[in-house]
Image: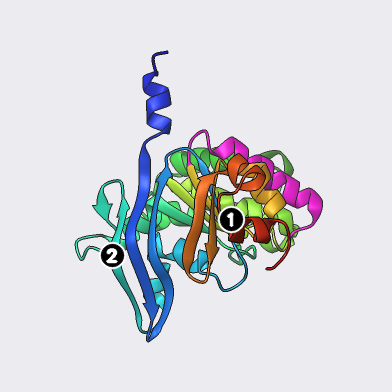
Amino acid sequence: MAISMEQRETTKTIISSKELNVYYDQFQALKNISINMKKNRVTALIGPSGCGKSTFLRTLNRMNDLVPRFRVEGSLNYNNQEIYSPKIDVVELRKQVGMVFQRPNPFPMSIYENVAYGLRIHGMKKKGMIDEIVEKSLRQAALWDEVKDRLHTSAMGLSGGQQQRLVIARVLAIQPDVILMDEPASALDPISTSKIEQLILELKEQYTIIIVTHSMQQAARVSDETAFFLNGEIVEFNQTHSIFTNPERKETEDYISGRFG
């Protein structure tokens, strides 16, 4: 059967690493990480605390640059460009590879200004265009209907789940290519968690999503592929269904069956 152009596009590798090693001073946090992550897929990073999954996530938009004595060896590529090349514009990289953190972190300003903030930082001045993107982003984040009548009230008055969707809208407003999510629902109640998960499934039609999660049930529900990290290494990387039903490595089986972690 012939593969359509659309189908070929979804199998394109967007981020890849080869023998990536990450150090904090003398401590080696990541060891020989080699992985290819595909466009318009959800990739889950799972593993016990301290295994390196959040460190890896933060290498993808150079958030680790802010950590003293951080250094990286090996290759890490985004759209065929070395992420750690001196030629890379880190501000532009973080625009293309957006980040949603564990706890909702809205700015202490109005709902509208939270979403408009990044647009203004990047030089957009036309109010009509900003209005349009604010509405579109809030709609994409499944929040518009809940906040459209209170756009100019403080974002701090929103519930935790609404705040996290607002943060996602803020990321979407600057039109990223990839969205990194570091345990985006771990601080939320079950209903809000369900809304975030539904949102992830909808967003992958337009974005590539890489999510760190402690919840194996969440990884199973939202991701297409899963990487299992242990002691700074990727033990196994495969389609999520295979990881959870027929893991190749005993360590993976022990972790997902609850024997450790």
Residue 136, numbered circle: none
Write down the region rendered in magenta: 188-207
Q: Secondary structure at mark 2?
A: strand
**Amino acid type of the residue tagged 1 in the rendering:** Val
Q: Is residue 116 above or below residue 234?
A: above
Point out the image quarter for the N terminus: top left
Residue designated by label 2 = 74
Q: Position of residue 22 (x, y in %)?
A: 37, 72
What is the crowding at mark 2: few (fewer than 14 residues within 10 Å), some, or many (at least 20)?
some
Return the residue found at the far top.
1
Q: Is residue 220 above or below residue 62?
A: above
Indicate yes or no whether the magenta region holds residue 135. Answer: no
Determine the residue positioned at 60% across, 48% down. Answer: 247
Viewer-nearest residue: 21 or 188: 21
State which tag comes first along the sequence, 1 or 2.
Answer: 2
Colour option used: rainbow
> With 31 as the anchor, is 87 left or right in this view?
left
Determine the residue positioned at 51% across, 37% down. Answer: 132
Q: Position of residue 91 (x, y in %)?
A: 33, 61
Which of the 4 image quarters holds residue 26? bottom left
Residue designated by label 1 = 167
